[in-house]
Each structure stands twice: as C-alpha cells, then as structure tokens.
Amino acid sequence: MSNPVNPALASMQDIQTPAEIGLWPLAYGYWLSLIILIVITTLLIVWFRKRRQVGAAKRMVLTELATLDQNSPQFAVEVSSLLKRAAMSYTSREQVAQLSGDDWYQWLNAQTNKPQVELCKLLALRYQKAQLSEDEKQALMLHAQGWLKAALPLRKMSSISPKSSEVSQC
C-alpha cells in the first residue's frame, strides 16, 4: 500500500482479533443445567430399580403359577399356598401365615378394589373329596393371576384385620 488514498488511513494499524472463546470454563447456567440433569437421571435410575425390585416377587410368583401342574390332585392347595407366599413377600409373616378359611378369603378380598368372589369359591373347593374339574382349574388359574396382578404389590392399608367389618365376604 504505497499509494494510500487517504493519508489518515495510513497511520492506522491493522485490526487485532481477540482470542477465540473456548468451551471452558462453562457459564454458571450450563453448570446448573448439568447438575439438574445428573440429579434427575440419578433419581430416575433409583426409581426404576426400586420399582423393578418391588415387582420381582410378583413376577416370580406369576411365573411359578404358570408352571404349576394342573393335573396334580393338590392343584388348588398349591395355588392357595402360592398366593400366601406372594402375600408374605410384601407383608409380615405374622399377618398372613395364620390366615385360613374365611379369614384368608376376606384378606384376599381386602387387597383389591373388586371382591374376588370366584377365586374364593374355587379356593374353598380345595379340600373337597372330588377333584376340581379342568374348567375349574383353568378358572382358578385365571383368577389367581388376576388377583396377583391387581393386588401386588400390596397397598399400604393391607394391615386391615381380617375380622374388620369393611372386608367383604366371599
């Protein structure tokens, strides 16, 4: 530029560009967003693990119910025993283990919103001399699965006494 058009421009120096802005350090807003994201992710992982752990007994019992031998003469007794074991997975042994007969049926009904009258009737047949028919066994299996899916995990009010007047009769 030996021949400048404007002599005032000749005295000026070239423009100096500032250094490039780097990623670090991050602004406070990014740090806050990152912390919130980590906390939410951690809470979701803990929630999913706990939910899976709570449902583990239910899944195990449903699998075991599906593998029961329907031709066994003790099929109804095995189903009742399986329901009782499932209930004891979610509540204290003292609360469920001693229940039998009408007290057991009332406790089963207290755990669901809809009374399981058919399940109770089929379980009541378990000590009859005549074995359950194939249709009764199939119905017992379906109603037991329905109860397990509807009642487990047990609600917080499962501490209702089986002799409570709120519990429906079979």
Image (cartoon, rainbow, N blue to C red):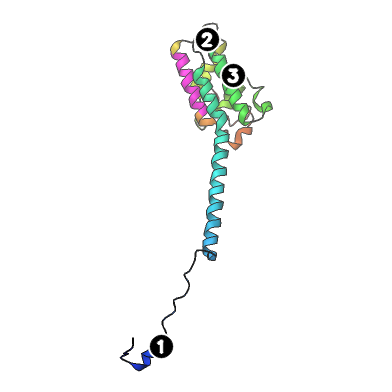
Res. 17 visible in picture: yes
* Residue under numbered circle 3: 81
Residue 163 falls in which quadrant of the image? top right
Membership of 131 in magenta stretch:
no
Look at 51% across and 33% down and name the residue there.
113
How far apart marks 2 and 1 lie (CA) works out to 102 Å
Local SS, label 1: loop
* Residue 22, position as x, y percentages in the image: 49, 66
Q: Residue furthest right?
A: 94
Q: Is residue 12 left or right of residue 65?
A: left
Q: Which residues are magenta?
A: 135-148
Local SS, label 3: helix
Viewer-proximal residue among 21 and 92: 21
Amino acid type at circle 3 is: Ser
Res. 110 visible in picture: no
* Residue 65, position as x, y percentages in the image: 52, 20
User: Which of the numbered marks, if any, corresponds to residue 2?
Assistant: none
For discs 2 and 1, the disc positioned in front in the rendered view: 1
User: Which of the numbered marks, if any, corresponds to residue 12?
Assistant: 1
Amino acid type at circle 1 is: Met
* Residue under numbered circle 2: 72
Viewer-proximal residue among 148 and 3: 3
Amino acid type at circle 2 is: Ser
Q: Disc 1, disc 3: CB below 8 Å? A: no
How far apart marks 1 and 3 lie (CA) works out to 96 Å
- Assess disc 2: are there few (<14), some (14-19) or many (≥20) residues with their C-alpha within 10 Å of its C-alpha: few
Q: Earlier in the sequence, mark 3 or mark 2?
A: 2
Membership of 146 in magenta stretch:
yes
